[in-house]
Amino acid sequence: PLALIAAAVLGYLLGSIPFGLVLTRAAGLGDIRAIGSGNIGTTNVLRTGRKDLAAATLLLDAIKGTIAVLIARYFWGVEAAIVAGLFAFIGHIFPVWLKFKGGKGVATYLGLLAAFAWPVAIVFALVWIAVAYTTRYSSASALTASLVSPIALLLFGYPREAILFALLSVALWYMHRANIGRLLDGTESKIGKKA
Ligand code: G3P
């Protein structure tokens, strides 16, 4: 149990680092939460016009999840890895540093997939790209990719992971409820549109 608690703390601490906020602030762009959708993720960082910062946000928000899982697995085993991954996701969405108002979890979801089942991380990325290419909606791309991923996990022989990621997908859809509303009434902003 001590290992699981350590894994939870490690996951939460890594997951709760709000890279989008940190990077844009360091670049002198002010508070990302006052721009565009107000979200701290890659899509909204892109609305500042800084593709480099958006790419760095995507990479770092993903890798923090990957690293949490890999460290926990190395030191404490598979169960601890699952706990670390779950708490990295929770940390990203509910960071204590931002009064528990964090991101929507897409990049971290991808980083966790990379750690648990890398072939399915590729499936996620391909679905995301395909939907983004056709619709130009980042939210719709993430929603579709997160719908496909648990099914892909089952098909690729990861039944336990399928359960974990089905849970994360539900949370991810819930975090996108405002985006879903905008998609339905046609007011969602498209990728690359500056704020
Ligand atoms: O899935 C992408 C999501 O994070 C959209 O971000 O800023 O448009 O709410 P945003």
Image (cartoon, rainbow, N blue to C red):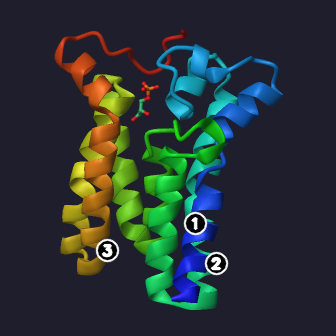
Residue at position x 66%, y 48% from top? 17
Q: Secondary structure under badge 2?
A: helix
- Can residue 1 be seen? yes
Q: Position of residue 57 (x, y in %)?
A: 63, 40
Residue 67: which quarter of the image? bottom right
Q: Position of residue 105 (x, y in %)?
A: 45, 46
Label 2: few (<14), some (14–19) or many (≥20) C-alpha neighbours in 10 Å: some
Left or right: residue 64 compared with residue 171: right
In the rendered image, the vertical position of residue 44 relative to residue 58, given as above or below:
above
Image quadrant of ligand 1 equals: top left
- From the viewer's side, name the closer residue of 158 and 19: 19
Lower position in the chain sequence, tag 3 or tag 1: 1
How many angstroms separate mark 2 from mark 3 (CA)? Answer: 18 Å
Q: Are marks 2 and 3 in contact (CB under 8 Å)?
A: no
Precedes in sequence: disc 1 or disc 2: 1
Residue at the image point whose x is 18% and y is 72% from the top: 155
- The residue nearer to you, when weighing 79 against 4, is 4
Residue 147: x and y in percent read 22, 50
Say which residue appears at 63% left-offset and 69% top-offset.
10
Per the image, the residue denoted by label 1 is 11
Mark 1 is surrounded, within 10 Å at the Cα level, by few (under 14), some (14 to 19) or many (20 or more) other residues, namely many
Disc 3 target residue: 161
**Disc 1 CB within 8 Å of nearest ligand 1 atom:** no
Q: Is residue 132 above or below residue 70?
A: above
User: Can residue 64 be seen here?
Assistant: no
CA gap between label 3 and label 1 equals 17 Å
Amino acid type of the residue tagged 1 in the rendering? Gly
From the viewer's perspective, is 71 left or right of 155?
right
Q: Earlier in the sequence, mark 2 or mark 3?
A: 2
Asked whether 155 or 76 is in front, the reply is 76
Q: Which residue is mark 2?
A: 71
As drawn, is 15 to the left or to the right of 106? right
